[in-house]
Image (cartoon, rainbow, N blue to C red):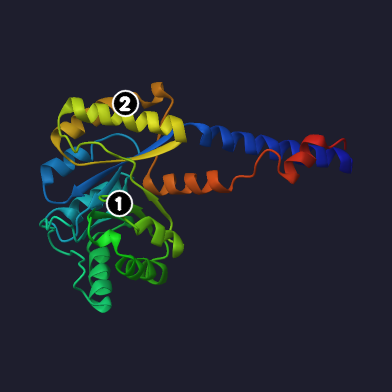
């Protein structure tokens, strides 16, 4: 086989590989994160029965967090730390909360204890946090610690306030990140949850991807059991949180069809 034929085969293979990747990434994708795992065993176990690549976020130092996180990992589910943070409303946050009164040492020590309290953690998101996530200094401490001590972890901004700077600071520290798009069960009725799920699907169709957050409420689990089974019909993918972040990074960095390499491949007369 001559060099010209080899080069033609190389460029053809390159275009085929790009086509496969673009086709897969072109399908709308959603991520579902179930927050507040760990306080209730029965609700947590029911939530773990959801099919597909659902991601689960566990509150640190809660009675059933370790047991349920181990079970989630055994089932091939992705595990996150659901990190309690100061809220403007003064809500009870539970153990392990980060607050504005901490020194940098206290802040990072508490973060370390929380991350080590949950096995198999791939990333973290904020629980509450409408006060803390608007403070660049506190978010800088957290992202610096992640960069230096846990560079393999990602961060998801739950966006409990429009004034959050958490994702912006994560990007500054090059912590892999994304954000919540839709809360599924702020209104915890079956009809409202299903409406919010449709909002999530339509957003994914428009922008290519969307992240939804729900909770292990019986009505949320019941709705998700039903609607997730129809995703193949909807031609929408359910992917884990880490896969979602990778997808978003690929979409930002993928070369345009007019890139020099592809122009050479398309115009080659070898």
Q: Position of residue 76 (x, y in %)?
A: 34, 45
Q: Is residue 225 visible?
A: no
Q: Which residue is mark 1?
A: 79
The image position of residue 39, as x and y in percent, is 12, 51
Q: Are marks 1 and 2 in contact (CB under 8 Å)?
A: no
Give the alpha-carbon distance from disc 1 to disc 2, as whole Å. Answer: 22 Å
Q: Which residue sits at x=38%, y=56%?
A: 167
The residue under the point 74% across, 36% down is 12
Quarter that holds the C terminus = top right
| Image side of residue 122 versus residue 185, left or right | right
Q: Position of residue 257 (x, y in %)?
A: 68, 38
Q: Nearer the viewer, residue 134 or 167?
A: 134
Q: How many marks?
A: 2
Residue 229 bears which disc, if any?
Answer: 2
> Considering the image in quadrants, where does the N terminus appear?
top right
- As displayed, is residue 72 above or below residue 107? above
- Judge from the rendering whether residue 22 lies leftward or rightward of residue 5; answer left or right: left
Residue 216: mark in rendering: none
Q: Residue at x 51, y 49 (%)?
A: 249
Q: Residue at x 30, y 50 (%)?
A: 162
Question: Is residue 46 left or right of 182 when viewed as pictured?
Answer: left
User: Is 112 above or below relative to 261?
Assistant: below
């Amino acid at each position: 086989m001559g060099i010209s034929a080899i080069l033609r085969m190389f460029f053809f293979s390159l275009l085929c590989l790009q086509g496969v990747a673009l086709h897969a990434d072109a399908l709308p994708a959603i991520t579902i994160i179930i927050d507040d795992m760990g306080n209730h065993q029965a609700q947590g176990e029911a939530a773990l029965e959801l099919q597909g690549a659902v991601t689960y976020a566990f509150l640190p130092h809660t009675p059933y967090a370790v047991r349920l996180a181990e079970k989630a990992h055994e089932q091939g589910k992705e595990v996150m730390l659901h990190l309690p943070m100061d809220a403007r409303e003064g809500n009870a946050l539970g153990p392990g909360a980060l607050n504005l009164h901490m020194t940098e040492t206290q802040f990072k020590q508490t973060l370390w204890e929380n991350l080590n309290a949950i096995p198999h953690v791939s990333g973290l998101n904020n629980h509450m946090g409408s006060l803390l996530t608007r403070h660049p200094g506190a978010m800088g401490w957290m992202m610096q610690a992640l960069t230096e001590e846990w560079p393999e972890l990602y961060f998801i901004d739950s966006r409990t306030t429009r004034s959050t700077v958490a994702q912006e600071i994560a990007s500054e520290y090059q912590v892999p990140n994304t954000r919540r798009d839709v809360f599924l069960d702020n209104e915890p009725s079956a009809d409202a949850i299903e409406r919010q799920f449709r909002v999530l699907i339509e957003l994914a169709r428009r922008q290519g991807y969307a992240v939804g957050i729900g909770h292990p409420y019986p009505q949320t689990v019941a709705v998700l059991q039903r609607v997730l089974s129809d995703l193949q019909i909807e031609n929408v993918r359910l992917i884990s949180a880490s896969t979602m972040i990778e997808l978003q990074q690929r979409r930002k960095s993928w070369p345009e069809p007019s890139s020099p390499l592809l122009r050479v491949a398309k115009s080659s007369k070898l």
